Amino acid sequence: MTTKQTADQGNGASQLSDETPDVPVLEARGLGKRFGSVVALRDVDVSLRAGEVTCVVGDNGAGKSVFIKMLCGLIRPSDGQILLDGTPTEFSSPRRARALGIVAVYQDLALTPTMSLWRNFFMGAEPVKGWGIFQRFDVEYAKQAMQTELEKLGVELGDPDRAAHTLSGGERQGLAIARALYYGARILILDEPTSALGVRQSGAVLRLIRRAAQRGTAVILVTPKPQHAFWVGDRFLVFQRGRLIEDRASETLTLESLSYLMAGGGEVDELESAIANA
Amino acid sequence: MSLLQLPAFGKKRPWVRTAVLRPELGSLVAAALLFIFFSIASSGAMLEVPTIARVLDTAWPYGIIAVAVGLLMISGEFDLSAGVMVGTAGALLGVMAAEWGMNLWLALLLSLGVCLALGLWNGVLVVWTGLPSFVITLGTFFGLRGANVALSKYFTGDALIENIDEAAGFDSLHAIVATVFGTAPSDFRVSLLWWCGFTLIATWILWRTKIGNWIFATGDDREVARAVGVPVNGTKIGLFMLTAGAAWFVGVSNAVRYTSVQAGQGVGAEFFYIIAAVVGGCRMAGGYGSAVGPAIGALIWGIAFVGIPHAGWNSDWRWAFLGVLLLLSTLINHIVGERVRTARSG
């Protein structure tokens, strides 16, 4: 709990959400997805606010990855709608979602291995100069802008010409998050950013996430680790069997109760009684 | 303060290190060594101007298409139909101009349209079906191989279409694609300038435009690229069309230069382009390579093609040479290249 409070000190998040208390950045209403006759997710009602870290937790197959994929345009919902700043919006592709300020950073889908850091950083959104057929990728600007953004976030990666796969797991996440924020991501979706990292690097990435929220970004964090979620999260969405079963603020939880919810909540009780009765 | 730290690479790299890490360096060294080798083996005949003219004249048709095939390879795809498409472009131009009496410039545009449509067909089919481009373009290869000859015979009664020089617009088109500098045998074609120009433009596109970044990204990791908003399908389709366009240029250039077209030409050349691209340092799996590399790869083929008979060897050894070259360069790229890529890519 001490860690938690330290983390929130000097955090501009509450201040930011006070200014715009009633307009959720992103809202899902009755959101659902069917694949043929299989219902992957149903009736999700959620609203996300700027400056908050919302942790999405749940078992494998609980529907959390389908949920975030719908938010970032990789999957189209079968039911319900998504509202951006209160306006119903359809995300036809990740490119469209990104143009609207929703950026997803995936555990495996963050960077391409062979390309340099700066090429990766601007991939799909290359800064250009010049006109018509003489329009060109502004390489000098790209390298400079990347370094500036990394410095602002306190991420040190060295030579911008390094191939991306020479980065460690934590550095990859750092670069991907910095990239998302650089593009003015208002909603940042992170899919298990710390799952492949050691303790020290996890800590660095979690601090980076906190910093992103302080800058007014709505962060959605998917993680299977209760400690990580609890340290960084403002809100917790618990998914189970294709449904959203809990939507809790961090004040209402302890690490133990969160771990209990993440481990499957009621399912654990069921399992225990099943074992006891066997 | 820094959250994530790693022993930083020096800001300034020694130029030697930078040069060693270029994808086309290996092919450049190989071309130089090969040229020196054949110069010695041919007792200096290799250094004479007519020989050099022949080397370049052998290399350019492969070079222009190899550059396009190289970009396509960097995006992670192959095109086995690029060779026969040279025949398609030439035969189309020949039938329309020599047989139907169409103005050559109009025939030029129409054949370009057909070739781009074939490139579009390849690209769309690869993107839609998700099948390996190897299979899709092999289908196009056989389809065109049959159609080129069958349609030429149907319209002209022969697989050899002649008298293209009698069509309207011949002189102006000839000046642009087939002008000669110097007198035979020390003659250099304007095609060499087209080759250089195309290689330079392709290099610029690859390294200094956003489309270049998309080409690298698409080949390096298609799903990552798509997730961050790179139009991967459009990039691939565009490159298949570029390859078809390069084949078109070579096909019509040859048709105008020789004033006749053998409809069956180009069969078998598809492998030369791929070999030139691989020798030039393009990674077969995509994501890494250059445009200059494939051009040098084609030059190596020209040096060997002309050098082997000049050295007094049986010309049949050319094919064996090509096999050894492919195997060696792939091995070198695999061993050295992978190590280099882990250090840096630009």
Image: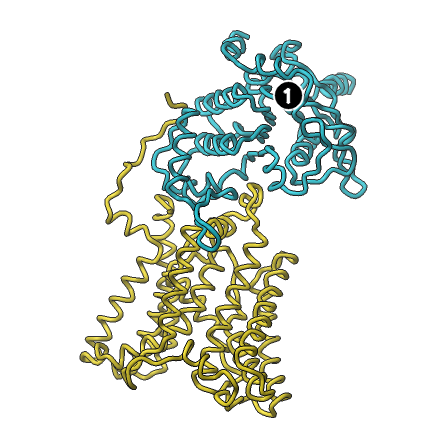
Chain colours: A cyan, B yellow
What residue is shown at x 54% (from left), y 45% (from top)?
Answer: B225
Label 1 crowding class (10 Å Cα cut-off): few <14, some 14-19, many 20+?
A: many
Quadrant location of the N terminus of chain B in the rendered image: top left
B253 w.r.t. A90: above or below? below
Q: Name which quarter of the figure residue B102 lies in.
A: bottom right
- Identify which residue, A272 or A111, lies in the foreground: A111
Q: Which element type, helix, strand or loop, lies under badge 1?
A: loop
What residue is shown at x 39% (from left), y 76% (from top)?
Answer: B319
| Chain letter belonging to callout 1 | A
Q: Name which quarter of the figure residue A30 lies in.
A: top right
Position in image of residue B45 (x %, y %): 21, 81
What residue is shown at x 62% (from left), y 10% (from top)?
Answer: A254
Q: Amino acid at mark 1?
A: Arg
What residue is shown at x 58% (from left), y 19% (from top)?
Answer: A51
- Identify which residue, B18 or B208, lies in the foreground: B208
B125 w.r.t. B151: above or below? above
A205 w.r.t. B200: above or below? above
Position in image of residue A49 (x %, y %): 64, 21
Q: Which residue is mark 1?
A: A49
Position in image of residue B172 (x %, y %): 45, 80
